[in-house]
Each structure stands twice: as C-alpha cells, then as structure tokens.
Amino acid sequence: MKLKEKVAIVTGSGRGIGRSIAERLASEGATLVICDVDGDGAVKTASEIAAQFGVKTLGIKVDVTKSDEVDALVKQTVDTFGGINILVNNAGITRDGLMLRMKEEDWDLVINVNLKSAFLCTKAAIRHIMRSDYGRVINIASVIGLMGNAGQANYAASKGGLISFTKTIAKEFASKGVTANAIAPGFIQTAMTDKLKDEDKAKMTELIPLKSLGQPGQVADAVAFLASPDAAYITGQVLAVDGGMTM
Ligand SMILES: NC(=O)c1ccc[n+]([C@@H]2O[C@H](COP(=O)([O-])OP(=O)(O)OC[C@H]3O[C@@H](n4cnc5c(N)ncnc54)[C@H](O)[C@@H]3O)[C@@H](O)[C@H]2O)c1
C-alpha cells in the first residue's frame, strides 16, 4: 500500500488504460478521482473501484479540453478530499489520416484532447500538488510521439508535444518536490487498437521484439511505479512500455 492517503486524478479513466491505471493506484491505497467525457463510464468505474479496493472515489463527467470543466474538477477534488498529490494525464484520442487528406478539424481535435488537456489539467492542479508534501505528474504519451507514424501526424505531434511538455514541467517544479514523467506505451490492447484490422495488428506484432500487444495493466504497473516513493529521484523521463519496439 504505497499510496495510502494520496489523492490521484486520472483523466479519461472511464475505460481502457486510464481505468487500469486507476485500479492499480487504488490497489496501492490511493483515493481516486475518475474523470471522463463519458460521464456514465466515470461514475460506474468509480463505484466499482470503491467496491473492489475499499478506497474513496469520485466519478465525474469532464471534457478535458474545456478549462471551466477542468477547473471544476480540481475544485471538486480539493473540496471533497482536501488536496491533490498525483495527476495522470491519460485522456487521448486518434483521428488518423494521411497528411494530404487530414482535415484541419481532426488536427485541432487531437491536439486539444491529447495535448492542450495536459496543459489545462496541470495548470489547474499543480498549485494544489505543490502544496502537498508528495507530488507526481504522469503523462501518457506514446511511442508514436518518439518515432512518428504515417497517417498519424496529428497524434504524433500531440504525443511529441506531451513529452516536451513533461520535461518542462519537470524542470519548472523540481524545486517544489514535484516530479513529472511520461510513459510511452507501444501497442496496447484497448478499444483504441481494437478498431485496427487484424492484418495490421499482425504486422505490428511482428515489429515488437516481445511478439505480443501489451495489456493496459502493464502500462498501469509503470504508472504505479512512477507514482510511488520508489521513483522519488526520477523526473523528466520517458519510460517506454512497448515490448522493446523503440530500443
Ligand atoms: N491503446 C494503445 O495502444 C495506446 C498506445 C499508446 C498510447 N496510448 C494512450 O493511452 C491513453 C489511453 O488510451 P486507451 O487505449 O485506453 O483509449 P480508450 O479510447 O480506450 O480510452 C480513452 C478514454 O479517454 C476518454 N476521453 C476521450 N476524450 C476525452 C475528453 N475530451 N475528456 C475526457 N475524457 C476523454 C474516453 O472517453 C475514454 O474513456 C491515450 O492517451 C492514448 O493516446 C494508447
């Protein structure tokens, strides 16, 4: 129980990797704020995690691209639990298409959900995280932010931006005892990758030295490590959880 009494917000945690992260942090005793644009998913996940792990939870509908909703999320968290220790910026989407055909609205949407959201959530929460004696910001980037990928200019730019944002936050808040790190998952089995064709999944698996897609729980284990006291001297880093794809 390495995170007992710690308060964690995980964005986009109604399902997928975010939900796994929330479960894993709860298994370490953390109090969890589950927020998602899918409000029903957030509320259901929050009550299931509370029942399974016996921790305090809150499920809130939040669109992380809207500053007023993000500010309300932070206020409700602090009003309910007294502060914030851990912020996991996980919410993310894809709108793939080759550059020449990519619509401007798909560029804007992906940048807003994947990158601007981290700015809004960190800006709103960091004051409270700094005030606590234990602070962690963990951003869920992607190997695509390190390598690029044809058909994902918007997604690659958002995740590359998230990595540089992480390093900047690490530098700005190190003196306040807050660490900031990014995780770069490879291909993880969730709704996001389920929409890919079987032949594309097979091709991807070939590129992975460990020869399998990753599981959300494996990303969550890495987040739990970075959120724990064991990672106190690690900041500004990008940890790839990718079966060896980017080595
Ligand atoms: N699945 C993968 O292979 C993979 C690989 C690398 C990185 N990632 C990253 O991991 C994160 C989670 O991905 P996932 O695979 O679990 O996807 P997912 O689609 O299963 O889950 C994403 C969650 O984010 C929520 N969300 C979307 N837009 C939102 C918004 N505006 N405000 C609040 N919540 C919003 C969705 O409702 C959903 O619950 C994303 O940032 C994604 O880019 C995933």
Image: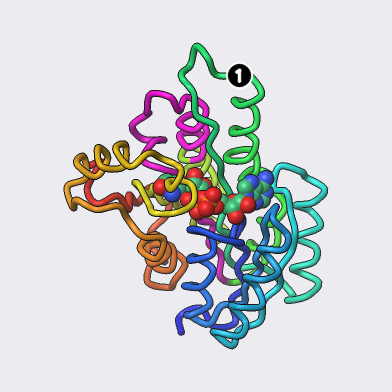
Circle 1 sits on which residue?
Answer: 103
Q: Quadrant of the C terminus?
A: top left
Quick check: 63 above or below 228?
A: above
Residue at 82 percent across and 48 percent down: it is 68
Query: Which one is nearer the viewer's eye here, 159 or 4?
Result: 159
In the rendered image, residue 233, in percent from the top left (x then y), is placed at 38, 62
Residue at 45 percent across and 34 percent down: it is 160
In the rendered image, residue 173, in percent from the top left (x then y), is placed at 56, 52
SS for tag 1?
loop
Farthest residue toward the front?
198
Query: Which one is nearer the viewer's eye here, 244 or 44?
Result: 44
In the rendered image, residue 96, in percent from the top left (x then y), is placed at 50, 29
Residue at 78 percent across and 45 percent down: it is 67
Count of numbered labels shown in the rendering: 1
Say which quarter of the image contains residue 45: bottom right
Q: In the shown orientation, is residue 137 left or right of residue 217? A: right
Query: In the image, is residue 200 part of the stretch drawn in magenta?
Result: no
Say which quarter of the image contains residue 19: bottom right
Q: Give amino acid for label 1.
A: Lys
Query: Which one is nearer the viewer's eye here, 205 or 107?
Result: 205
Residue at 66 percent across and 56 percent down: it is 126
The residue segment tinted magenta is 134-162
